[in-house]
Image (cartoon, rainbow, N blue to C red):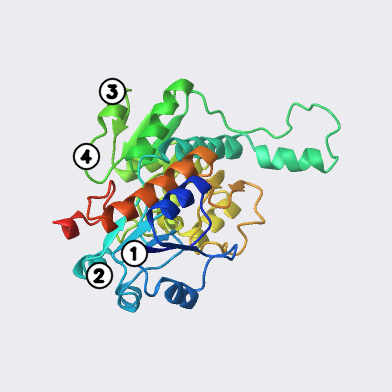
Amino acid sequence: MPNIYVTREIPQPALEFLQEEAEVVDVNPHDRILEHEEFLESIAGRDGVLCTLNNKVDAATLDAAPSVKVFANFAVGFNNFDVTAATERGVVITNTPGVLTDATADLSWALLFATARRVVEADEFLRAGRFKGWAPMMYLGADITGSTLGIIGAGRIGTAMGLRASAFRMNVLYCNSSSNSPELDGKGARRVELDELLSESDFVSIHAPLNEKTHHLIGRDELARMKSSAHLINTARGPIVDEAALVEALQNGTIAGAGLDVFEDEPALKPGLAELKNVAILPHIGSATTGTRTKMALMAAGNIMAVLNGERPENPVNPEVLK
């Protein structure tokens, strides 16, 4: 019977599943991210670890916990892992793709609407008691219907974002590292290079994975290529955007606004970002619905038990370990 550690509280159905299947299931008792030393102490001697994107698992971590056979990431992204080091040590890494697609795409649209229609600004204005009646020029925002949406990364979430755009009669452009998206193409979308996407789009939404090629993919030069009336949406990973350059662009009017659910040095924000009125910021809640987080937790738990039972997990990041 396996010994499992869970690095943050997760929905109860997944904990109950693990408790039925494992001899020991310990959960981080603190409502916070574990310090790295605490993380190392907690996973020592375990067979499996259900972790979050906040837990860095590098070669040193793997060597400090040689008994761990599987790390199940409670996220679709896995940039918190040294996958090569895990593969070399025969440790399986899994993630939770698919189940969070719609929730994250929905939140991307929420941010797009919030920044385009200045929802946060207007809400604060009203709550402060400053609303004295309707006015023709009060909180003018950007038109969404009939505008151009540019999608960076046409995977599951990017595709879902683009498909929703048809309801607003938007022109959709997308750039992708590997291939065309048949689903988006079928809706009249057009695959273009990044420069064209940036210069032509009224809204740019990022859905690419974080890796060496996408780190600071959007920096000062890229922001300068965007329309001064454009808005940038990021629900992928913070370091894809040079956050300091974004703050400067928002301050100077290089672009009109931004909607962010992720940040470069999360949970810290770059100086000046929180004070800006033309940005809507959220605390990384892209997949935060009860249904989605429960599905993610059950998937991660199922991945752990599959590996520990000698079966193939549903979502291996490094399937070559299983051969």
Of the two numbered discs 4 and 3 on the same chain, state the one appearing first in sequence: 4
Check disc 2: other Cα within 10 Å, few if <14, some if 14-19, many if 20+. some
Q: What is the three-letter code of the residue carrying label 4?
A: Ser
Distance from the alpha carbon under mark 2 to that under mark 3: 40 Å
Please tell me how crowded label 1 is: few (under 14), some (14-19), or many (20+) other residues with Cα within 10 Å.
many
* Mark 4 burial class by Cα count in 10 Å: few <14, some 14-19, many 20+: few
Disc number at residue 85? 2
Asked if residue 298 is positioned above or below residue 202 in the image, the reply reads below
Residue 128 at what x, y percent from top left? Answer: 83, 43
Q: Is mark 2 on a helix, strand or loop?
A: helix
Marks 1 and 4 sit apart, C-alpha to C-alpha, by 25 Å
Tag 4 residue = 179
For label 1, the residue is 81
Q: Choose between 249 and 319: the one closer to the eye.
A: 319
Q: What residue type is labelled 1?
A: Phe
- Where residue 152 sits in the image (x, y, percent)? 36, 43
Question: Which comes before the other along the chain, label 2 or label 3?
Answer: 2
Which residue is rendered at x = 60% and y = 64% of the image? Answer: 271
Identify the mark nearer the N-term, 2 or 4: 2
